[in-house]
Amino acid sequence: MMNTMTSALTVAIAVPLEAELVDQIRAVDPSVTVLYQPDLLPPERFPADHAGDPGFQRTAEQEERYWNMLNRAQVLYGFPNESPAGLARVAAENEHLQWVHAMAAGAGGAVKASGLDRKTLQKFQITTSAGVHALPLAEFAAMGILNGFKRTAELVRDQQAKTWPELRTPTRLVSGSRLVVAGLGEIGLETARLARALGMRVSGTKRTVEALEGIDAVTDNDGLAGLLTTADAVVNTLPGTQYTEKLFNRAMFAAMKPGTVFVNVGRGTVVDEEALLEALDNGQVSYACLDVFAVEPLPLNSPLWSHPQVLVSPHTSALSAAENRLIAERFCSNLRIFLDGGELPHLVDTIHFY
């Protein structure tokens, strides 16, 4: 769907955003009216805190102003209240809504959770901030690989116990090792770039199999097990869909070489966590660095919390102090495309929800 409007366009800022970045959006085109009322938005507790302080409460008058503002706009920057319920409400109330830009790289789950039907979802476009988070996620993945190869979990335990082992265990060289990236999209390719800089040889998977510069072999998910047989480390960047549900199951972990390092910066539902725990306990996986989980927050009774060879990160690896600026820059670029009648990039697939 392309923008065919010839009249002025109204953009409403639905989530917390710095005033200078709002001005950057205003500067895209003089025909654009940007609605921004900071008193209606919860204060950020940290950079890129899109949901804002949960203790923030609007008065009844502020709540009415907030929704009036959103319902006047053809374009929204952020989901209302940064929630699926907010998206569902604005879709029902705003009859001239054309485009919503999500703060998340993987907004498909939130769109699905909104419960909107296909007919409603076809009335407007939803774009994600995919790519904005590629570098911090890739850096986190590189950290996970290095942690596993350099035995940081054991080093931390020895330090806490004030133990200086008599037997000095050698670490593994990252350079010359093999990495498999499940999902060679923007995050996967950025991970591959950093891995190659460390001297790794990289292969991976992609829905559309094609040759990629710097990647030794590319296959689809059906060929993943074959790649895993020679991998020293595996990074998952895949989104959570019906086609990736528990893709990393017992068979996949069994296909890995003993001692493989596993990193997940995609979605937790891609991994069968019971199978991962078994692989950790039998040595197929020597170390797991996990930023995402099947259920979030990770339940207190999950064995992953206390496993000696697991690093648990609370789905924060994509966060960086530069995130708001990078998302605003992405939105400005998209806004220019939208105004010119072009096709927006990074649209949410409303069939598979990624």
Image: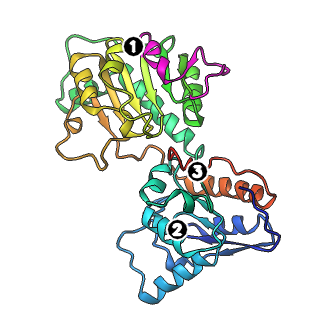
Question: Which residue is the site of mark 3?
Answer: 129
Residue 118, position in %: x, y?
53, 56
Magenta-drawn segment: 207-232
Provide the secondary structure element on which disc 2 rests: loop
Q: Amino acid at mark 3?
A: Ser
Q: Residue at x 42, y 38 (%)?
A: 242
Q: Residue at x 55, y 36 (%)?
A: 187
Find the distance from the CA under tag 3 to the CA under tag 1. Answer: 36 Å
**Proximity of marks 3 and 1: CB atoms separated by less than 8 Å:** no
Question: Which residue is the site of mark 2?
Answer: 16
Residue 316, position in %: x, y?
41, 47
Find the distance from the CA under tag 2 to the CA under tag 1. Answer: 44 Å
Question: Which residue is the site of mark 1?
Answer: 172
Provide the secondary structure element on which disc 1 rests: loop
Which of the numbered marks, if any, corresponds to residue 354?
none
Picture quadrant of residue 229: top left
Q: Amino acid at mark 1?
A: Arg
Provide the secondary structure element on which disc 3 rests: loop
Q: Is residue 193 above or below residue 48?
A: above
Find the distance from the CA under tag 2 to the CA under tag 3. Answer: 16 Å
Comparing 92 with 297, the one in front is: 92
Comparing 216 with 317, the one in front is: 216
Q: Is residue 285 above or below residue 320?
A: above
The answer to whether 127 appears left or right of 3 in the picture is: left
Picture quadrant of residue 97: bottom right
Q: Earlier in the sequence, mark 2 or mark 1?
A: 2
- Does any portion of residue 242 appear in the rendered image? yes
Question: Is 171 in the magenta?
Answer: no
